[in-house]
Amino acid sequence: MSNSKSSVISTSSTTSRKAIDFLVNGSIIIGFVGVVIFFAITSSSFFKWDNISDILLRLSITTPAAYGVMLALVAKGIDLTPGTTMGLVGITVASGVTAGMNFGLSILLAVLVGVAVGLVNAFLIAKANLNPFIATISVLFIGNSIEKSVTRGGLPVYLYPAPPALNQIYRGSTLGIPNPILILIILTLLLYLFLEKSKYGRRLYACGESIKASRASGIPVRLYYGAAYFISALCATIGGIILCSQIRSGQPLVGHSYMWDAIGAAYLSTIMSRRNFRPNVFGTLFGAVVMATVANGLTLMGLAFYWKEFAKGLIILIMLLVSVMKKRYERSRLF
């Protein structure tokens, strides 16, 4: 009799434990589903293809920058320069085209600007051993100043008419797939293969998890740290080119509206991870979907822009609270 009672208690405790596990690990997904249902009820156009297409196209701009922040998180750092890089890249493309430069050359020059930002970040963090937050926020302020100075105090550089090749980046399609979505798919697969399937990605994760163990294994930790910030800048460069194609101009500080979305999406990937809060590609992609969906839903509701900022701040705060709760819960399971 006592054995049967103990087995019932054991079964019920296992069931409740599984239920708690599901709620803790799936809290973000459950919350996202609730948000989607709310927007679908409040706006009849939410599930229309045109609106879904808008969300996907926004993802093609936000997600590359989010991938860059994710790489910095893998190296146990932070990168606050994606928005600045996007702005500098867009201004470079627009300024080159308006000055009569060949479009391909303008793109090449913009890529070199992104490379320069990545090299500066890599040097400051990996070589000079500066705190990633201090280093990247310093580069952010310097980049903001450059954006304003080359545009005579912050005037947009418009491209009307825009070169056909520039229009094709955002508005064209290949094999029926919109070009920005195709670029995002390729970038996602490349980063997934790099981080999850290559020895270099595994070494980068190892550097972030334990510097001492990585050095003892012969991994050049500083080189991998620098590489993370360099690739981060390249990802932001891709987002900046797509953004320039969308708005047909180079606008100072325009990338900053995407920076916080990128940071929120990258941090969300750590909460979604089942492997010790490990930043990852698909978690970051899901985070970008969450941020883009919330921004889109609030727009459909006709709310002012400052309420969007309020919502983003609230989402990030909720993510932090969920992260703390998840850590406490996982610690409690060890005892």
Image (spheres, helix red, strand yellow):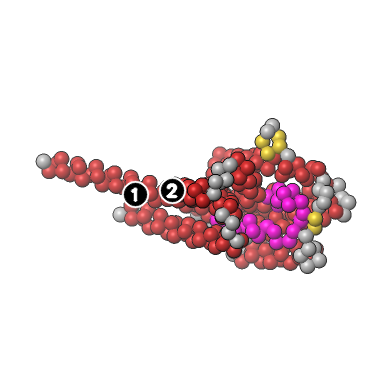
Say which mark, if any, is on residue 97: none
Q: Which residue is mark 1?
A: 20
Q: Which of the 4 image quarters holds residue 194?
A: top right
Name the main secondary structure of what is drawn in magenta: helix
Q: Which residue is mark 2?
A: 30
Quick check: is 255 in the magenta stretch? Answer: yes
Q: Furthest residue to the top? A: 175
The residue that appears at 74% across and 48% down in the rendered structure is: 245
Amino acid under disc 1: Ile
Report crowding for label 2: few under 14, some 14 to 19, many 20 or more residues within 10 A (C-alpha): few
The magenta stretch is: 239-264
The residue that appears at 48% across and 50% down in the rendered structure is: 38
Amino acid under disc 2: Ile
Give how far across and how far down residue 273 sits, in percent: 47, 48
Give how far across and how far down residue 50 sits, in percent: 63, 42
Q: Secondary structure at mark 2?
A: helix
Q: CA gap, disc 2 to disc 1? A: 13 Å
Q: Furthest residue to the right? A: 100
Report crowding for label 1: few under 14, some 14 to 19, many 20 or more residues within 10 A (C-alpha): few
The residue that appears at 31% across and 47% down in the rendered structure is: 17
The residue that appears at 60% across and 61% down in the rendered structure is: 304
Q: Is residue 5 visible?
A: yes
